[in-house]
Amino acid sequence: MRTRNPTFDRSKLTAVFAILLTISGTSACGDSEDSAGDGETGSTESTGLQPMSTSGSDGGTLGPTASSSSGTSEGSSIGNTVSWSTGTSDDGSTGSGSADGAGSDGTGTGAADAPEESGGTGEQESDASSEATGFDDDGSSDAAETDALAPRVFESTPVHGAVGVYPAEYYWDPAPMRGVRERVFVRVTFDTEMDTEEATVVVTDADGVEEARVIEGTWDETGHTLTAIIVPLNDDPQFPLSDETTYHVDLSELQSEDGRPVDPEDPTHPESRLSFTTGVRNGLLNHACIHIQHGPFADAVASSDPMWGANADLGHTHYTITLPEAIEGEPHVGHTTMYTQYLDDPSEPVRYVIYLRAPLVQFETMPFGYTTGPFAPALVEEAPPACHVVDSVLTDPETGERTAGPPIAGITHQVVLTLLPNEIYSIRWTSLENVVHAIVEWDTGSF
């Protein structure tokens, strides 16, 4: 009978246990890594799969793209996790990674882990910066794309779609056999420099009643703003535009300096056509514009006493009225007198219009003799733009020839009065300036 060696048995048993522990430890580590893949994004290399991504039209992947998101169980240290695919690089390799939204304490405040291969959120920030600045990652700008767009109207006079545009601006043409004329300015400013060799616009009415007018405009020195002047058809003495009529100014012949035509297909603004609707011409106002340049002129000294104001009541006359001095910081106040006339019926009220080259603080009337008042205020309103600015007229003392001089203020405001005929009125003028320029017109309805 053989005797067992206890020392040998213990040694062998120890070796067996060591082998078993080694095998068990290796298996446990593998299970741990596999289970971690359930909570976080697993390695794409181990599975051979790419995270879900968006494909471009050419079949390539567009990135970075959010592909998956896992929730957070109670007590877990892993928050919302997003996998990113950066697309396919030139060498065919793909990069991926995860951005973990939770901190190690499970509060969800930890910083995002950027994927090593793709640059993670760094690539997103680059894209956002590129979009905000208009520059791509390679330093190039969006100028090439912008330059490919058609020229756009930056601003215009009249404004596109405007209603009530004054249809007849007064001016005086000093050329022989010309004299008093009327016109309408159209100005269009583009957002890019234009081809100044082409300045043709075509003006038509919406109803197709009038003959189309082909007008050669003028570019400013920057090449951005075109000015076209609409004059009466066939240069006759009629008005340049009809009342309450819609007109179109065709700009389709224009193009940018590099040959891009004005776009007629823009859905938000018909860049190739400027449209507006006219208001009503005021014949008396346009007639008063003549007196700004050509008179007759008269001076009047206003009085501080309503009973002693100088006369300033002649129609068709350009008055220069000097008001009394005022305390510093206070407006000037002075009085003139006006004798009203009548046509046929002395009982019918008469209509006067006082045209002004500058606004007044106040304009008041009172029947003469009622020294205690009260004065009745009249509305001082802005006048239509028939002649807000006009050229001064220079006369040669030797030859008497008149030429246009520097621009001066024209008629900017007006006061409309309805007064009893055959009466004397005291007019109180209140102004910040001590000189008032006024044109008195008796509205007989003949203009």
Image (cartoon, helix red, strand yellow):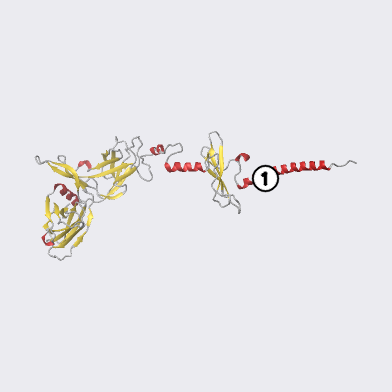
Query: Which residue, as the protein is rendered here, is positioned at the far top?
Result: 91
Q: Identify residue for label 1.
A: 31
**In the rendered image, is residue 339 in sight?**
no
**In the rendered image, is residue 363 in sight?**
yes
Badge 1 crowding class, 10 Å Cα cut-off, few under 14, some 14 to 19, many 20 or more, is few
Q: Which residue is nearer to you in this view: 438 or 444?
A: 438
In percent of width and height, residue 2 lies at 89, 41
In percent of width and height, residue 231 lies at 23, 43
Residue at point 38%, 37% (across, down) = 147
Horizontally, residue 237 falls left or right of residue 153, namely: left
In percent of width and height, residue 422 lies at 11, 61
Which of the image's four quarters has the N terminus? top right
Amino acid type, mark 1: Asp
How many numbered marks are there?
Answer: 1
Q: Quadrant of residue 420?
A: bottom left
In percent of width and height, residue 416 lies at 19, 57
Horizontally, residue 12 falls left or right of residue 213, namely: right
Callout 1: SS: helix
Query: Which residue, as the protein is rendered here, is positioned at the far left?
Result: 398
Query: Which residue, as the protein is rendered here, is positioned at the far right?
Result: 1
Residue at point 63%, 40% (across, down) = 46
